Image (spheres, rainbow, N blue to C red):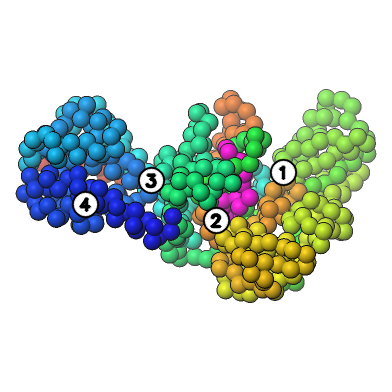
Amino acid sequence: MTWTEWFIFLLILQIIHGLGTWKLYVKAGRQAWEAFVPVYNAVILMKIISRPWWWVILMFLPIVNLIMIPAVWVETARAFGKDSKLDALICIVTLGFYLYYLNYIEDVTYVENRQLKPKTSTGEWITSILFAIVAATIVHTYFFQPFVIPSSSLEKSLLVGDFLIVSKIHYGARGPMTTVAAPMVHDTIPKLGIKSYLFDDNFEERETSWQNKLQLPYFRLPGFENVERNDIVVFNQPADTLLDMNDFNPNRNYYKPIDKKTNLVKRCVGTPGDTLEIKNGYVFINGKQNVLPPRSHLQFSYRLTLKKPISTVGEERMFYNMLDKADIDDGFRINPDGSFYLAAVSDEAANKLRVQPNVASVERVIQEKGISGDVFPRDTYHNDWNTDHFGPLWIPEAGSTIQLNKTNIALYKRAIGEYEGNKVVTRGDEIYINDKLATSYTFKQDYYWMMGDNRNNSIDSRYWGFVPYNHIFGKPVFIWMSIDGLMSGGIKNWKFRWDRIFTTVSGSGERTSYFIPFLVIVLGIYGFNKWRKKKKVSAS
C-alpha cells in the first residue's frame, strides 16, 4: 500500500477502536469523543490502563506492534475487571473484538489504581519475556543486528564463522517493509522450515494479493555515513528467489519482499556514477585500478604443479603443512593431469608456494578475454564478458540520465523495471517504458557494485548486476565471536579464533582484540554494583 492508503487504513482502524471502546472511556472518567481521535486516543488509553505514554510509540512500530497491540487489548480488559487467563485468551483470539462485548453488553466497572504486577510467577515470566522480545526487536530492527559469515567470499578480511555486529545507523536504519512477521528471524522460522512472514510469493500475484497490500513503502532514517568505495556492506540480494536462504535448490522461484531477501556481505567496489571495468580479475574504476584497504587480500584460483607426485603419507602431510604455512585454507581439488586446483590464493601465498622445493609451477586460473562467462547481463551484445574480463559499465546514480538503445537496455532493464517500478518492453530496436517510447531514462535511486575479495569463489554483482540503495542493509563494525569449523562439522570440530574476538571489521594496521578490556569493564561494573548494594544494606 502507498502512504495515502495506509493513512486511510489507520483512520478506519481508529473508527473501529472508537466504536468498540467509547463507553469504556466514559466509565473511566473520560469523554466519549476521546476514543475516536487518532493517536490522542492511544495516549488517553495508556492513562486508563495505567501504562506509560511511550507504549503509544511501540504500538506504531512495525513488527513490535504485533506484540504491543494484543498486550493493550488484554490490559484494557484487565482495567475493567476482566483479568483471568480466559479473558486474555478471548481478547487475543477475537483480535480485540472482545472489547466490543465489554463495551456494549457486559456491565463492567473501571478498576482504578489496580495492581499492575502479575499475580503469578508464570505471569511475571511471560511479561518479562514479551518485553525482552520487544526490546531486542527494536534494537534488531533499527540499531544493530547480529550476522554470521556463511561463505569465504571475503576470506582474509572476514572468515567463515565470524559473528558480526552489523550497524544499521551508519547508513541510516531502513524501516521494515513487511508488517506481519515473526520477530528477530529472517525469511524462515528455524526448525519449522516455513516462511516467517505474511506475503504471497507467487510472482504473478505480487500486485493483486491482499497479503502484499500489507507491505509498507520503503523509507530510511538519516545516517551519518554514505556507502563508500571499498566499504564492506551487508545487503539484501536483489535477485534472490529462494524460499529459504539456506536452501539453494528451491522447487520453484519465490518472489520476496526486499527486507526478506537473503542477506549477503560483500565489498562495495563501485559507487553511483562510477564506470567499472574488470581486467584480468582486477577492478578498475574510472580507468584506475582499485586499491583495497591494508587488511584486505585479493585471492584468485591457481593451478599448482608439483615436481614429484605425492606417494607417501609423509609427503601428503608435508603438502598440507605447505598449504597451511602459506595460509591457504579454502580447499583444493586434484585435476585429471595430477595438478592441484587451489580455490583461493593471495599474491603473498602464491609467492610462498613458488619457492618451495617440490613446486614446479604456480599459475593463475583465468578466463581469457572474449570468452563468454555466463555473467550479467547475459545478452548477445555483452556475450564476451566473464568474471575476469568485464565492462566497461556505468553504475547508475540518482538523478542522472542515460541514453537508452538496443545495445545497453539489457544492462539497465532490471533496474528501471524491477527496482524502480516501471514497465519496460523492447520491440525491435525500440524501447517502451510504461507504454511510452523512450530514448533515455533518469534514475530515481543510487546503485552499487558489490564483489567478494575471493574473486573466483564469490557469487556477486558480476552474476546479478547492480545493488539498489533500498537493498542496503547495514555496515559490519565488530566481530564479537569467531569459530573455525562452524560450517564444516559438529561442535567437536570447533576452534575459537581468540585473536579475532572483539575486533573491529575495518581499520588500518594489525587487528587488535578488545576482549580483555571488555571483560575488565564488565567485571568492574559488576563489582561496583555489588559494592553499592552492600553499602546500602549496611547503611540501613
Q: Any magenta on residue 244?
A: yes
Q: Is residue 408 magenta?
A: no
Q: Nearer the viewer, residue 290 or 206?
A: 206
Task: Write down the region rendered in magenta.
Answer: 231-245
Amino acid type at circle 2 is His
Mark 4 vs 2, N-terminal side: 4
Label 3 crowd bin: few (<14), some (14–19), many (20+), radius 10 Å: many
Q: Earlier in the sequence, mark 4 or mark 1?
A: 4
Which numbered tag is attached to residue 42? 4
Which one is closest to the eye, mark 4 or mark 1?
Answer: 4
Q: Secondary structure at mark 4?
A: helix
User: In the image, what residue type sits under mark 4?
Assistant: Ala
Circles 3 and 1 in contact, beta carbons < 8 Å: no
Residue 412 position within the rendered picture, expressed as x and y whole percent measured from the top left: 68, 63
> Which of marks 1 and 3 precedes in the sequence?
3
| Pointer 2 residue | 471
First in sequence: mark 3 or mark 4?
A: 4
Instruction: From the image, state whether disc 3 or disc 1 is nearer to you.
Output: 3
Residue 63's tag is: 3
Residue matched to label 1: 327
Label 3, label 1: how far apart the Cα atoms are? 44 Å
